[in-house]
Image: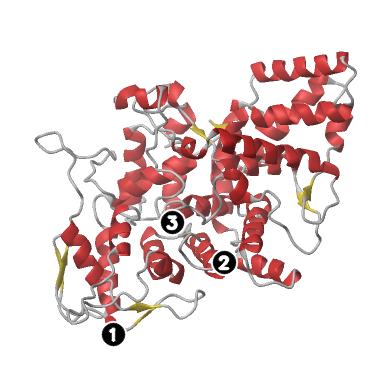
Amino acid sequence: MVRSIDDPKQAAKFLYRATFGPKQGDVDDFLTLGTDAWLDDQFTRSWRLHRPLAEAYANASNDKLNENARLSAWWNRSLNAGDQLRQRVAFALSQIFVVSSNGGPNSEGLVEYYDLLIKHAFGNFRDLLEAVTLSPAMGKFLTLEGSRAANLDDNTFPDENYAREVMQLFSIGLWQLQSNGMPKLDANGNKEPSYTQDDVEQLAKVLTGWRRDTYLTPMYADDRRHDFSQKEVLGQIFEEGQSPQDDLTQAIDLLFYHRNTPMFISTLLIKRLTISNPRRSYIQRVSNIFKDNGKGVRGDMQAVIRAILLDQDVLDGKAMANDQKGGSNERNFGKVKEPLIAMANLCRALKVKSNDPTRWWDFPATQNNFGQAPLRASSVFNFYQPDYAPKGEISDKQLCAPEFAILSMDSMRRISNRMWTVILSHDSTDLKRWSWSRRQYERKINNPDEYIGLLNECFFAGLMSEELADYIREMLATMTAENREDDRKINDTLFAIQCSPEFRCQE
């Protein structure tokens, strides 16, 4: 694992993975500070929570905390908060430990849950898993709250929903894994399940007896609803008579120390932060750090994040070869940006600000236009499956590109239209809109080389290709020959930038 980045292009790529997009000057600041110092600074910065901001926005509008206030707070924190790495990791975690407004808690519960992910993003995975389990928002969403011991007279049984998903999605996954994250195969070449239906039923008994008071405090134990019988989960005995907390502690430990968990969670985080098709050796290196951070600690999230972002494969541009072979293929490196990341990159490049001095508004109309919004997935399986592959070349090569699952023709149109609206909002005074200053673009628009250099700095942090630069240069020449106004030149070139594959993909 590489510990230092001193190349401007590598620094730019790093910042696109570790933040919601670099702003002007961020690459130079990163290089001046140094890789380890930058990470240490991010790991120790005070977290910027969302609920206080969402509450302030609701109060400013004489309203209750609602989805507009919650999503507005998300945009403000994602675009402006100094703890960018924590905010970025929390967003990744929100797509692993999914809670959603669809069938779930209210806006207060959702924003408090997101803050839980922010607080635990740099802690220990075991603490994160227990906090998620006891979250009243999760209790509501996956119906653990109120689950009680079986009553045969009433024909009621413990709720199995959370017991199943905490294994399938939040810890060990469906299949037994090798140390490199690939599924184990039996003698017949079939994948081996990591748990059985009986394990689900037994774990459901273990997790009975938890109740919700408010959305702002963890669920509490209710002995009257707990199943005190002996249980057996994944081959481990839960002794008769254990309290709800004792059973919960043992269950979290069981999942945390399961051999699958490091590989399963590391793979999900890699796909959310860096590339869609990591090599097995990359997964194994990160998993080893999950197992032991070098100081005998398992589940150290800071060490895992550092390992993900600084792995040699990431810096060398290596990804899984076609057909899941053991080699590498640089053509398969990178990932498609999900819509919210692309929009955040654009807005940070433009340095957008709110026109309303009292609050931000959900000007992008996030859910309607992007096919996703924080904590608004259609189900616990997130906006897309981590191994989704669109039909055609990607699936034929046995690769994956998860974000394509929400990039339909209609969503692409909506995303581009909303980005166009942001570009046109530079002089907006509408209180419910965002705006930005384009003075530096106006000063350079009639000097193509300087203007393209500015676009490269602001929107690509120095990574713009010569091909794209030539395309923009030709656009400017054509519009100049047609006597187009500077206003039109700026608008059209910025729109072309955001439409480009280079902008919509992450290296």
- Secondary structure beneath disc 1? helix
Q: Is residue 201 shown above or below 392?
A: below
Q: Which residue lies furthest to the left in this view?
A: 187
First along the sequence among labels 1 and 2: 2
The reply to whether the C-beta atoms of the residues labelled 1 and 2 are less than 8 Å apart is no
Q: Is residue 379 shown above or below 26?
A: below
- Secondary structure beneath disc 3? loop
First along the sequence among labels 3 and 1: 3
| Mark closer to the observer (2, 3) | 2
First along the sequence among labels 2 and 3: 3
Q: Position of residue 258 (x, y in %)?
A: 24, 55
Q: Please name the residue shown 42% across and 69% down the image.
A: 140
Q: Residue furthest front?
A: 154
Residue identifier under label 3 = 98
C-alpha distance separating marks 2 and 3: 15 Å
Residue type, mark 1 in image: Asp
* 333 left or right, relative to 44: left
- Between 296 and 443, the residue placed more toward the observer is 443
Q: Is residue 90 shown above or below 328?
A: below
- Between 165 and 460, the residue placed more toward the observer is 165
C-alpha distance separating marks 1 and 2: 29 Å
| Mark closer to the observer (1, 2) | 2
- Between 343 and 104, the residue placed more toward the observer is 104
> In the figure, residue 371 lies in which quadrant?
top right
Residue identifier under label 2 = 107
Residue identifier under label 1 = 223
Dot 3: within a 10 Å radius of its alpha carbon, few (fewer than 14), some, or many (20 or more) residues? many
Q: Residue furthest bottom?
A: 224
* 419 left or right, relative to 378: right
Residue type, mark 3 in image: Val
Dot 2: within a 10 Å radius of its alpha carbon, few (fewer than 14), some, or many (20 or more) residues? many
C-alpha distance separating marks 3 and 1: 28 Å
